Amino acid sequence: MDSQQIIAPSRAPSGGVLHVNVRHTSHFTVVGNHLAQHQDLSLVAIGLATHIQSLPAGAKVGIKFLVERFPESEARIAGALRELEENGYLRRDRERLASGRVVTRTTSYNQPCTQATSPPARHPNRADRTGRASTRSTRLARPAAARAIPATAIPATAPSAPAPVPVATPVATPVAAPGPATATAPAPVAAPAPVRPQPQTPDPDLHRTASALLLELRREAAVLVLSENDVHSLTPAVATWLERDATPASVTRALTTDLPVPLKYPAKLLAHRLSTLLPAPVPASSVAPPPVPFQNCDDCDRAFRAPEPGRCGECRTAVL
């Protein structure tokens, strides 16, 4: 009972921060102050390093995945990753798998690794992609202790080597075995061309009317000039329209309205419209019977409806 237990947090100076700390028992990550209070790293780089260190082994940390996860732009995340590489908190190596595919191995260090290879120097006059000026890039340069010493600067008598810095052993990221090659999808099958309609009962009069209608189309649209073979092949389809109680005017309007410009194949366009716009057949029950013709009475000469000539009803009653 010699140690004093602090129940309430100590009061900070005016304007300072107050810490209310709760001990974590699960789902936490230990981050050193050398990272959290780094003098040369940007706030984006510090936060990104903390996020990467909290991920399990094998998690995706590529730029595309980080852009989908965070609101920062791709340029800012790429710049933060370069900062972490320059300061020894991250290393990215490109390896070629047995299948020939090239992957990037990313190693995260919770202590700065002094054996990380130095990245290529930036252009001195180019502004940083994150929107900072080139003066900011000099502040983000790698510390002198982590830079590689050029060979010309090594003296003949080397001083005693410093104590080796412990380096964390990189954890190999498991790589999934390449799956079997997917089968090539079959080529799409073109839809069959619509069948040209044929009349149910051959009628010479309908065929003559249909042939004349096709020949007259050029008067309605000058581009609809058909050859003799085209007229012969399209006549049954037009006769089918006429058989289904379509008037010649309605058939002409359907074939000449909204023609494409330019029209290269008039016969093919007419065949397509005659097949796809074919009116439905009229049911037999809905066809009205022909009206009874008028007849003149043989006695009074008055008109009346009857299938055959004769007397009207009043004259037949008078005779009886």
Image: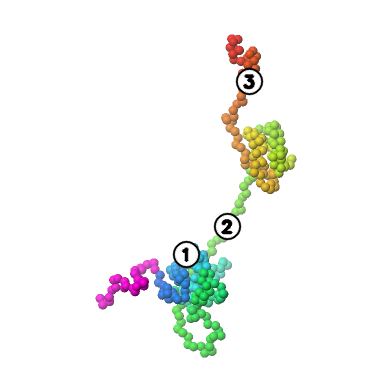
Q: Are marks 1 and 2 in contact (CB under 8 Å)?
A: no
The circle drawn on residue 150 is none
Q: Taking 233 as reference, is 163 above or below it?
A: below
User: Looking at the magenta stretch, what is its main secondary structure?
Assistant: loop
- Closer mark to the observer between disc 3 and disc 2: 3
Question: What amino acid type is highlighted by mark number 2?
Answer: Ala
Q: Which mark is residue 183?
A: 2
Alpha-carbon neighbours of circle 1 within 10 Å: few (<14), some, or many (≥20)? few
Marks 1 and 2, Cα distance to the nearest angstrom?
36 Å
Q: Which residues are magenta?
A: 1-28
- Residue 56 figure quarter: bottom left
Q: Secondary structure at mark 3?
A: strand
Q: Nearer the viewer, residue 77 or 99?
A: 77
- Tell me which residue sits at (47%, 66%) in the image: 59
* First in sequence: mark 3 vs mark 1: 1
Is 193 positioned to the left or the right of 16 in the image? Answer: right
Q: Where's the C terminus, which quadrant?
A: top right
Residue 73's x, y, as percent? 50, 65
**Extreme-top residue of the structure:** 320
- Residue 91 makes an appearance in the image: no
Q: Which residue is mark 1?
A: 70
- Residue occupied by mark 3: 294
